[in-house]
Amino acid sequence: MHDVFAKENHESTLTDVELVSAITAWRPSLATRVRERLITVGRGVVVVYFPRLGKPLQWHHRVVLDAAAQTIGHIKGYDFGGHYEARSGYSGPLFFLDEASHLGIRSPNDLYGGIVPHLFAKTKAITHGLVDHDAERPLGWSTVFAERVREVVLPGYTVFSNRDARLAATRMLDRGPIRSKKPLSASGKDQTVITTLPELDAVLEKVTADELAGYGLVLEENLRQVRTFSVGEVAIGSLRVSYHGTQRTVMDNAARPVYGGSDLVCVRGGWENLGALPMSPELRAAVAAARRYDEATEEFHGFTASRRNYDVAQGVGADGRPRSGVLEPSWRVGGASSAELAALAAFARDPSLEIVRASHVEEYGEGSRAPADAIVDFQGDDPEAGPLLRYTILKPRDQQLRQKISGRCSRGWRSLPPPALPSDSDSRVIRFPSQTGASHRSHRGKAPIGYSGPDCSPIPDLSKYERREDDYQHRMVINAIALIFVSLLSFAGFWLVNAIAHS
């Protein structure tokens, strides 16, 4: 649980970090003090902040957070100030609304992450409702929010006591296995599939009374054959990007299934631009569920976020029927953040860019190597996680393709029907218009049947190879000449064979 935020300071315009390099060559001992002064009085500073909620971060998470903060610094033109320190003038944890004023955070423009009015509200605990009206709940619990998202999440409950947990499990186990989740855990950790009440008791024994009362325990329907989508919207200043994508699961060094990265399609703009992209019905349903969940956050007074990420699962329930639901929100730096920030940086560099593909990959074990064009976020032996490689890739070929499309058709591509594309993003499909379609285009400029808009193909025009008119008489003459020639050739061959036989 962590965040990155930017603090702007208008006391001075001194931000020339090249000055530090010059001073370092002249007097290294002075360079550190100059750099600190530049960060203090410069146009702005990006720092990493670790609030008190959550478990201690692993080493590779801290390294990736530093890289994320530096990327944000490049996008905003700010300095990177390292980790938050109280002596820098900030006080209080980032996610406490009553302490946000001490941090200078008053809007989403001041941070990459989110502010919630209560600690439990930034976890997956808010996804489900309570077991009944008498159920235990923390101060600030919103029954209205749970009701608003009930139709876009999986069947389940959030419980804050052993009594409520057993009551919820008793109801749910009649329909099949349930999955327990600790709200403070991430990446698929601390989750257990429960089929009996004794198995629930074993889980509850590992949760302290204070943890259960403060953050709760999630019990929801367990799915098989699960596919998880990542859907979200992020903003840094005036630059806003929305995306959809899929997550992958890998085995960590302890042979446990964990989050292994995300493949995202990122578009410039917010939810409306995302909804205009071509996508499958399943993906469109996931985007709609995430957006509805996001709209329900209005119930949390004081909530604000510049990063809004939602995991949406689709799978098969115990009864064999398909199920779909938002698993949890993420209003902090998460697994997909590296891909999000890489896309944001690409959009910032090129204002004409409309859409890019960005992938974040996590690989465990020895011997993993990142592709040559990858941005390596972490590679090494984490003291807790073990050997690990984390990297991010932008698809430059796809960027160029979309640039050509958006450049040739302006914004008209958003209104086109979904194209039938192969799974290989590097493949190209060239559509050859039929002779009939070609002839129809010459009649008063009317579009042929099946026409779907302007030709936005990045492939060069092939019209010069078309035959505009079908000359029937010419073809018949050519066929007659060919027939005569073949007949003469056959007669000559027969005569030659006969002459040889009588010689």
Image (cartoon, rainbow, N blue to C red):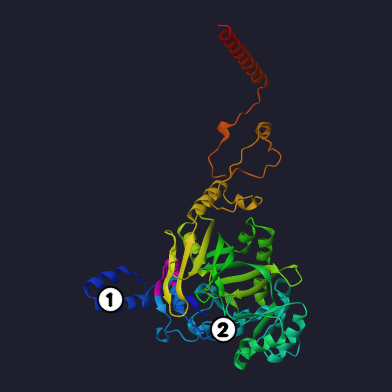
Picture quadrant of residue 62? bottom left
Gap between marks 2 and 1 measured at Cα: 37 Å
Extreme residue in the bottom direction: 209
Q: Is residue 407 left or right of residue 478?
A: left
User: Which numbered marker is on residue 461?
Assistant: none
Residue furthest to the left in view is 26
Query: Magenta residues: mostly which secondary structure?
Result: helix
- Which image quarter: residue 251? bottom right
Occupied quadrant, residue 153: bottom right
Q: Residues within 10 Å of mark 1 (few under 14, many from 20)?
A: some
* Amino acid type, mark 1: Ala
Dot placed on the residue nearer the N-terminal end, 2 or 1: 1
**Tag 2: Cα neighbours inside 10 Å, few (<14), some, or many (≥20)?**
many
Kind of element beneath mark 1: helix
- Find the magenta span and give its range: 69-80
Out of 350 and 463, give the one closest to the viewer.
Answer: 463
Residue 343: percent from the left, percent from the top?
50, 62
Three-letter code for the amino acid on which mark 2 is drawn: Leu
Identify residue for label 1: 31
Q: Is residue 139 visible?
A: no
Q: Is 101 within the magenta? A: no
Instruction: Relative to 370, say whether 117 is above or below.
Output: below
* Residue 133 percent across, percent down from the top left: 76, 88
Residue 242: image x %, image y %? 58, 64
> Label 2 belongs to which residue?
97
Residue name at image x 67 percent, y 89 percent: 201
Q: Position of residue 385 (x, y in %)?
A: 47, 77
Please give the name of the residue rendered at 52% of the width and 63% of the height, measured from the top-left corner.
359
Residue at position x 58%, y 10% from top?
501
Q: Nearer the viewer, residue 209 or 494?
A: 494
